Amino acid sequence: MTAEHTTSKAGRGDPFARPHGTAPDWARAHRAGIQMRYGDIDTMGHLNNAVYVQYLETSRILLMRDLGVPDDEDRSVIARLELDYQREIRLGQDVVVETLVERLGHTSWTLLSRVTADGVPCTYARTVQVRVDAALKPAPLPEVLRQRLDTLLAYPSPPEGNT
């Protein structure tokens, strides 16, 4: 899929599409349905900007659980969070957070997420998580976690010989 094919109804494309035209493979994404609450809406009648961060947090917790990581072993902190609001979300819409892995490092990993409403991408996010030990110092990613996160890579490597 090329970048020109990723334009949303809001008129802007996927901010994670690479310059050479490769877009994230959202068909492979982890999906977390979000229960919107009346209190999530601001005085303008749309989802309050701060609530998006809560939705992303909920989706990350569900992602880790779905990857088989027990809550007490999910020792990570958010080092960076970027949000790109493209379209408003209104009360009553069906909200889903889709998440892919952009990068796996030695002690950290980067997630790409998009928040959709009624199937339309509305907001994109990039978060960097850092694995920490009991003293909150960066710690290497366990190999089992690395293998599980690898299944959600946004830009899978082409098979050998197809470069």
Image: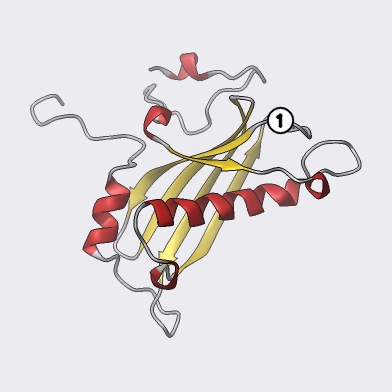
Residue 40 in picture, x, y percent from top left: 78, 47
User: Is residue 110 among what the camera can see?
Assistant: yes
Residue at image position (76%, 46%) is: 37
Location of residue 100 in the rendering, given as x and y in whole percent from the top left corner: 41, 41
Q: Is residue 74 left or right of residue 121?
A: left
**Direction top: furthest residue:** 5
Q: Image point 22% across, 35% down: which residue?
A: 157
Most foreground residue, 95 or 42 = 95
Nearest the viewer among 130 and 47 is 47
Identify residue for label 1. Answer: 93
Query: In which quadrant of the rendered image does the C terminus lie?
Result: top left
For the point 42% across and 56% down, the residue is 64
Q: Amino acid at mark 1?
A: Gln
Q: Quadrant of residue 95?
A: top right
Classify mark 1: residues with Cα within 10 Å, few (<14), some (14-19) or many (20+): few
Residue at x 38%, y 17% (from the top left corner): 1
